[in-house]
Image (cartoon, rainbow, N blue to C red):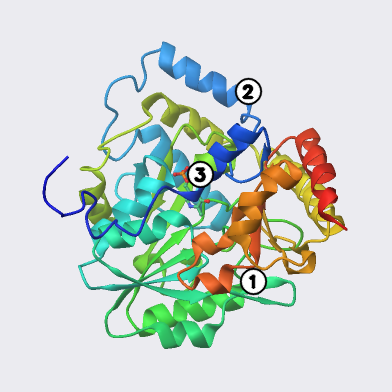
């Protein structure tokens, strides 16, 4: 304890209290409610990939500091994955950097590329670490709000264009988008790319849900569009793609100059992480397409259970085109305040969800929306739906 009146937490971070996930997960634990708040699967990823991690550990691969940029096996596998899926060619030695999850990739990219005072445009609602990392980098966040339109949250391209100023340094994108489930279309991405080229902006694009797109939605990496490869940092992660969120293996792909810059920050954050897991993820990325297709099909089935159940319980449902979240509108239930609704929900229905308002600067815009995760076993989803139906009156 210091005697001065100065607060311990510095000004950059003062506005960020405990994350909502900690608060809601504690509430779930205290009440025995089903936790559809935090987005982690309740089933581990493929057995053979778990075994690959055990093998690496036993054989002494990765038990000591791995190379700073990541083990060559993983960098090669990331490059092969980008080439095979998207036709994007990256040099594993100079254009791939392994990070401690996408979280560190986001932090390192912003700390490396943003000068104090630079403006960073992020699509609102945004993943909670974006705001904190922009703040730690001394940047100024400029939210552009996705709004409901024909059953999905969509980007207003005119609003995006109007948000760019002479101080704008980078666009921070996320597609497929958490929490709304929106997948940016080729038309939207083409317009974003043209704007980035015209205004000479860098783009950091968080594509951790690249394998979780449903129906006729298509994930298009921004880096595939004209003029974008050299100005885009693309972020991927094994956490969401392979259901190993605790392993914290992520990566970026970008030009050598961008990778070098991001690495300058990354080396002083964790330096390296997840040694044995890096070898296992290298094997996971080489799994046949049938594996990814089965994963998508399985998650799609869970989406159907939760989306249909929420609709029957009386929620307005935005059926997601990607990710493993459903954003709902609580106004049809006669509610308007997502915070109050989520705080009461464990008591009322034995379920935990996340108020989308925490992902907004314009909190009022997000007030009536609430997010549920469907990356849970079917029995858990069935039970959650049965409980939520108590809300329908
Ligand atoms: C989960 C998530 C992350 C964090 O990924 P890790 O690899 O676990 O660090 C980043 N961005 C979005 C949009 C996420 O949903």
Query: Label 3 to label 2, Cα distance in Å?
Result: 32 Å
Vertical arrangement, residue 164 with respect to residue 386, above or below? below
* Residue in the foreground of this view, choosing between 312 and 376: 312
Query: Label 1 to label 3, Cα distance in Å?
Result: 26 Å
For marks 3 and 2, give the one nearer the viewer.
Answer: 3
Determine the residue positioned at 16% across, 54% down: 6
* The N terminus, quarter of image: top left
Label 3 or label 2, whichever comes before in sequence order: 3
Name the secondary structure under disc 2: helix
Q: Residues within 10 Å of mark 1 (few under 14, many from 20)?
A: many
Q: Name the residue under label 2.
A: 47
- In the displayed structure image, the side of residue 373 where residue 269 appears, left or right: left
Q: Name the residue under label 3.
A: 23
- Residue 363 x/y as whole percent: 51, 70
- Residue 16 x/y as whole percent: 36, 55
Q: Mark 1 points at which residue?
A: 153
Determine the residue positioned at 54% across, 37% down: 26
* Residue in the foreground of this view, choosing between 8 and 98: 8
* Residue in the foreground of this view, choosing between 286 and 9: 9
- In the displayed structure image, the side of residue 340 where residue 331 appears, left or right: right
* The C terminus, quarter of image: bottom right
């Amino acid at each position: 304890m210091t005697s001065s009146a100065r607060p311990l937490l510095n000004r950059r971070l003062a506005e960020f209290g405990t994350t909502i996930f900690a608060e809601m997960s504690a509430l779930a634990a205290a009440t025995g409610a089903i936790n559809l708040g935090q987005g982690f699967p309740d089933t581990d990823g493929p057995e053979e990939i778990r075994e690959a991690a055990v093998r690496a550990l036993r054989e002494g691969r990765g038990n000591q500091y791995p190379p700073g940029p990541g083990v060559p096996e993983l960098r090669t596998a990331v490059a092969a994955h980008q080439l095979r899926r998207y036709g994007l060619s990256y040099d594993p030695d100079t254009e791939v950097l392994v990070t401690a999850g996408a979280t560190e990739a986001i932090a390192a990219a912003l700390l490396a590329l943003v000068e104090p005072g630079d403006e960073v445009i992020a699509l609102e609602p945004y993943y909670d670490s974006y705001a904190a990392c922009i703040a730690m980098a001394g940047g100024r966040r400029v939210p552009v709000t996705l709004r409901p339109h024909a059953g999905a949250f969509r980007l207003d391209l005119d609003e995006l264009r109007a948000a760019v100023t002479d101080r704008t340094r980078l666009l921070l994108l996320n597609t497929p988008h958490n929490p709304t489930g929106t997948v940016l279309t080729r038309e939207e991405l083409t317009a974003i790319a043209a704007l980035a080229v015209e205004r000479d902006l860098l783009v950091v694009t968080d594509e951790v849900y690249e394998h979780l797109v449903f129906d006729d939605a298509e994930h298009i990496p921004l880096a595939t569009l004209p003029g974008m490869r050299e100005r885009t940092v693309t972020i991927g992660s094994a956490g969401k793609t392979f259901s190993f969120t605790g392993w914290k293996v992520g990566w970026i792909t970008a030009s050598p100059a961008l990778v070098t810059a991001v690495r300058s920050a990354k080396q002083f954050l964790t330096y390296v992480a997840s040694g044995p897991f890096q070898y296992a993820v290298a094997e996971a990325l080489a799994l046949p397409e049938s594996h990814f297709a089965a994963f998508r099909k399985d998650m799609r089935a869970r989406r159907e259970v939760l989306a249909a159940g929420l609709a029957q319980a009386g929620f307005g449902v935005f059926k997601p085109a990607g990710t493993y979240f459903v954003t709902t509108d609580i106004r049809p239930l006669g509610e308007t305040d997502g915070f109050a609704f989520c705080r009461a929900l464990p008591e009322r229905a034995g379920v935990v969800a996340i108020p989308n308002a925490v992902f907004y600067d314009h909190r009022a815009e997000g007030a009536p929306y609430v997010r549920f995760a469907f990356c849970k076993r079917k029995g858990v989803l069935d039970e959650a739906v049965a409980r939520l139906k108590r809300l329908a009156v």
